[in-house]
Amino acid sequence: MKCPICPGILKEKDSITHFHSSLRSDKDKEHVCDSCYNKFQLLPNQTLRIISQPHYNCKFCQRYCRHVSWSSASFWDHWKCENCRVVFRLRNDLVAIEFYLRHLEKFYLLTVFPNDNLLKIEEITEEEERDFSPIPIMELCLDPVPNITPDNVKQKLETYLLFS
């Protein structure tokens, strides 16, 4: 069965476990999407009712982040904190933190990959903003990766660009 939210497939999962399958009823079965991890209950009229949704709180302000996309090509969920203007890329665990900012009339994407000790800076031109094909500026392997936050990202970007 296909997920009604994303391109994923719903897998049947028992919400309670019994030794005898005859004791289980349809209301005890939930369907979990293998991509977006939303959980659904199959109703008697064969419609799906959402019973839980994944969530992510911002690493910086602890507020709820909005799920902005799911990409089957990248296998990442994207969560955006409107307060901090940061996007978190996740797949079971934090993969990357994306900071989008303007500096000297140009748009930049500064991405921190904490598990890989990697920092990447890319320029986004106006034409590419729609297609999202950033121009690589710099890629640094840093151990440990510096503590970049919404409060200091502009200063860090200026410093890195100075040495690029």
Image (spheres, helix red, strand yellow):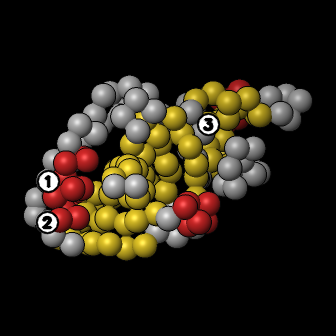
The residue singled out by tag 3 in the image is: 39
Q: Name the spot of residue 133 as percent of width and height, x first.
A: 52, 70
Spatial separation of the CA atoms under disc 3 and disc 2: 39 Å
Q: Residues within 10 Å of mark 1 (few under 14, many from 20)?
A: few
Is residue 123 placed above or below 30 in the rendered structure?
Answer: below
Q: To which residue does mark 2 refer?
A: 142
Say left or right for 39 vs 56: right
Residue at image point 72% right, 47% down:
3
Between 123 and 37, the one nearer to me in the picture? 123
- Indicate the position of residue 14 as horizontal and vertical percent values: 60, 38
Q: Nearer the viewer, mark 1 or mark 3?
A: 1
Q: Amino acid at mark 3?
A: Lys
Question: Is label 2 in contact with label 1 (beta carbons under 8 Å)?
Answer: yes
Q: Nearer the viewer, residue 54 or 104?
A: 104
Question: Would you say 22 lies left or right of 64 here?
Answer: right
Vertical placement of 130 versus 61: above or below? below
**84 relative position to 18: left or right:** left
Q: Secondary structure at mark 1?
A: loop
Q: Is residue 41 visible?
A: yes
Q: Callout 3: helix, strand or loop?
A: strand
Is mark 1 in CB contact (under 8 Å) with mark 3?
no
Residue 31, given in percent of the width and then of the height, sits at 66, 41
On screen, residue 3 versus residue 19, left or right, reads: right
Residue 146, numbered circle: 1
Residue contact at pointers 3 and 2, CB within 8 angstroms: no
CA distance separating discs 2 and 1: 8 Å
Instruction: Using a 10 Å C-alpha cutoff, classify the residue at mark 2 as few (fewer than 14 neighbours), some (14 to 19) or many (20 or more).
Output: few
Amino acid on which the number 1 mark rests in the picture: Pro
Q: Tell me if I can see residue 96 in this picture.
A: no
Q: In the image, what residue occupies the spot 85% across and 28% down?
A: 44
Which label's residue is closer to the chain start, 1 or 3?
A: 3
Q: Which of disc 2 and disc 3 is earlier in sequence?
A: 3
